[in-house]
Amino acid sequence: MNLPEYSKVSTAFRQAQALSEPAESHGTLCGLLAAAPEADWQEQWLRLSLNSEGQGAVSLPASVRPVLDALYDATQAEMVDLQMRFEPLLPDDDHGIAERARCLGLWCQGFLFGFSTARPGSHEGLPPQVREVLDDLGRLAQVEPPQGEGSDEDEAALLEIVEYIRVAAQLVHDELKLKQGQPPTDTRH
């Protein structure tokens, strides 16, 4: 199962009048799923992303719900995939490097928010690798995007960071799942 395209999710967020951006919202979802992999986060994630109050199912326009459901389902499947197919939802290469870097920072902020929502309080007691990833994501969330079109070095650095967060998100998920005594999901081959 593949993530919906960033542009499709962006359109759905505009139609739903979401306060967060797609990259930030996806980071939040990934943080929730990584911090507490056993929980069903779908409606809470939608409430957080859309600033919706109440309990139960979030009310969405008919054209929006299938896109966000597909994003949730694909993300959940990718997080447990042992073949490491997880990808953060970020704008594609048609967007300038400054926009992609800005969205990467938002994704990292969202991940930290989702993680702290699912696991409030101190990070004491977390495996050292998980604490290191959270610290790294905190630093990445504060990085200033390059000005202008960026250089080849900027592009290479951005690709390296995307690869790092791709692996880091799955590492956090797997470490915490193992800590809870749950084996990795059998969907990995």
Image: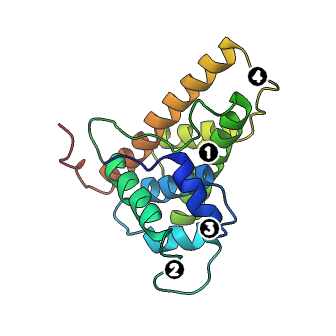
Identify residue for label 2: 58
Mark nearer the viewer, 3 or 4? 3
Mark 3 neighbour density, 10 Å: few (under 14) some (14–19) many (20 or more): few
Mark nearer the viewer, 1 or 2? 2
Identify residue for label 3: 15
State how far apart marks 4 and 2 are (Cα): 39 Å
Upstream in the sequence, badge 3 or badge 1? Answer: 3
Identify residue for label 4: 149
Circle number at residue 186: none
Upstream in the sequence, badge 4 or badge 1? Answer: 1
Residue 142 left/right relative to 130: right
Q: Which residue is drawn at 53% across and 77% down?
A: 60
Q: In which quarter of the image is the C terminus?
A: top left
Question: Relative to the observer, which residue lies in front, 33 or 106?
Answer: 106
**In the image as oriented, which residue stretches furthest toward the top?**
152
Upstream in the sequence, badge 3 or badge 4? Answer: 3
Identify residue for label 1: 108
Q: Which color mode does the image show?
A: rainbow
